[in-house]
Image: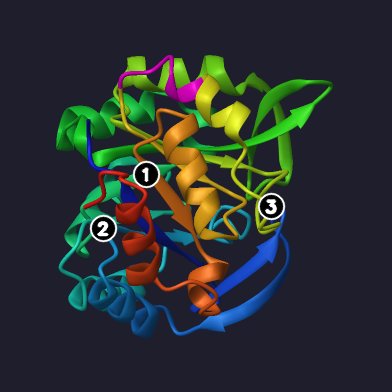
């Protein structure tokens, strides 16, 4: 069995780390460079950096900030937000990222997944999916959760993998920031059908929630933000809890 990964996420707006509930009501959570350094020191397995307003503001990702964060990390580093072309992906990698996360641009231009995968390899391509449940079906959202598409989440995830995505970052919009637990049904529906790693995102509030997502789904990673940013759960404490529960953890 693959060892499970604990992954803090830095949602970035105006150069600061922010966090809200269901993508709204954002509040400041601290300096991204300081948080990145802290999480690496505490034993995070990877770090995700998402420039959440880049697509909405129609601008490129904050390259200089990516470089600053990369300098303090010695763990895999995924960057997303506003990446619309292979050239922009190259610049992000040159800035110090290990993986590229694409969402809205991939929905608009699915070939972008293949372009990046051919150039850097599938292991560098993370397809981020913001999923919203409507009428008992799960649909893909873009533009920071603001635009509901007609793409079904499961179908899009499969297509993304076929096009070259080496990993899926799956965020449940209904669970995001609520701290009531990961969306087990959504994560299992996707993770059981794909042979690439799935990162569960949205809803982490307790150590038990991580145990549940690792035992009730095939997800190999679990992402969280506010519980780490606001020091509700420490990464080392969480990992020890999972080890005590005999979860294979890095």
112 and 227: which is toward the camera: 227
Question: From this viewpoint, is residue 95 visible?
Answer: yes
Disc sitting over residue 196 in the figure:
none
- Left/right placement of residue 52 relative to residue 122 reads right
Q: Quadrant of the N terminus?
A: top left
Whether the magenta-drawn stretch holds residue 102 is answered as: no
Q: Position of residue 68 (x, y in %)?
A: 27, 78
Using the numbered discs, state the Cα–Cα distance from disc 1 to disc 2 in whole angstroms. Answer: 9 Å
Which residue is pictured at 16% across the width and 32% down the height?
121
Kindly identify which numbered label has been placed on residue 180: 3
Residue in the foreground of this view, choosing between 18 and 180: 180
Gap in Å between the C-alphas at discs 3 and 2? 23 Å
Image vertical order of residue 190 relative to residue 85, above or below: above
Q: Report whether 197 appears left or right of 151.
A: left
Question: Sequence-wise, which precedes: disc 3 or disc 2?
Answer: 2
Q: Are marks 1 and 2 in contact (CB under 8 Å)?
A: yes
Q: Secondary structure at mark 3?
A: loop
Dot 3: within a 10 Å radius of its alpha carbon, few (fewer than 14), some, or many (20 or more) residues?
A: some
Report the magenta residues as a range: 190-195
Label number found at residue 45: 2
Left or right of 86, for residue 102: right
Of the two numbered discs 3 and 1 in the rendering, the one whose residue sits closer to the viewer = 3
Q: How many marks?
A: 3
The kind of secondary structure element at disc 1 is strand
Rendered location of residue 237, percent (x, y): 38, 70
Name the residue nearer the viewer: 63 or 218.
218
- Residue 193 counted in the magenta span: yes
For the residue pair 77 and 53, the one nearer the viewer reads as 77
Marks 3 and 1, how far apart at CA: 18 Å
Q: Residues within 10 Å of mark 1 (few under 14, many from 20)?
A: many
Q: Which residue is mark 1?
A: 221
**Res 238 → quadrant:** bottom left
């Amino acid at each position: 069995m693959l060892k499970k990964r604990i992954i803090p996420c830095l949602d970035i707006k105006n150069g600061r780390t922010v966090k809200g509930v269901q993508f709204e009501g954002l509040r400041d959570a601290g300096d991204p460079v300081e948080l990145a350094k802290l999480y690496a020191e505490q034993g995070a397995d990877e770090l995700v950096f998402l420039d959440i307003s880049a697509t909405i503001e129609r601008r490129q990702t904050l390259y200089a900030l990516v470089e600053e964060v990369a300098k303090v990390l010695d763990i895999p580093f995924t960057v997303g937000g506003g990446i619309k072309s292979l050239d922009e992906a190259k610049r992000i990698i040159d800035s110090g990222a290990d993986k590229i996360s694409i969402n809205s641009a991939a929905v608009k231009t699915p070939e972008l997944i293949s372009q990046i995968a051919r150039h850097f390899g599938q292991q560098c391509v993370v397809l981020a999916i913001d999923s919203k449940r409507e009428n008992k079906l799960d649909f893909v959202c873009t533009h920071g959760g603001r635009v509901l598409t007609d793409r079904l989440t499961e179908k899009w995830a499969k297509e993304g993998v076929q096009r070259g995505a080496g990993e899926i970052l799956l965020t449940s919009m209904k669970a995001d920031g609520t701290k009531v637990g990961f969306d087990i049904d959504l994560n299992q529906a996707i993770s059981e059908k794909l042979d690439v790693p799935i990162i569960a995102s949205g809803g982490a509030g307790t150590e038990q929630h991580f145990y549940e997502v690792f035992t009730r789904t095939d997800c190999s990673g679990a992402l969280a933000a506010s519980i780490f940013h606001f020091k509700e759960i420490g990464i080392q404490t969480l990992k020890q809890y999972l080890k005590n529960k005999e979860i294979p953890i890095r």
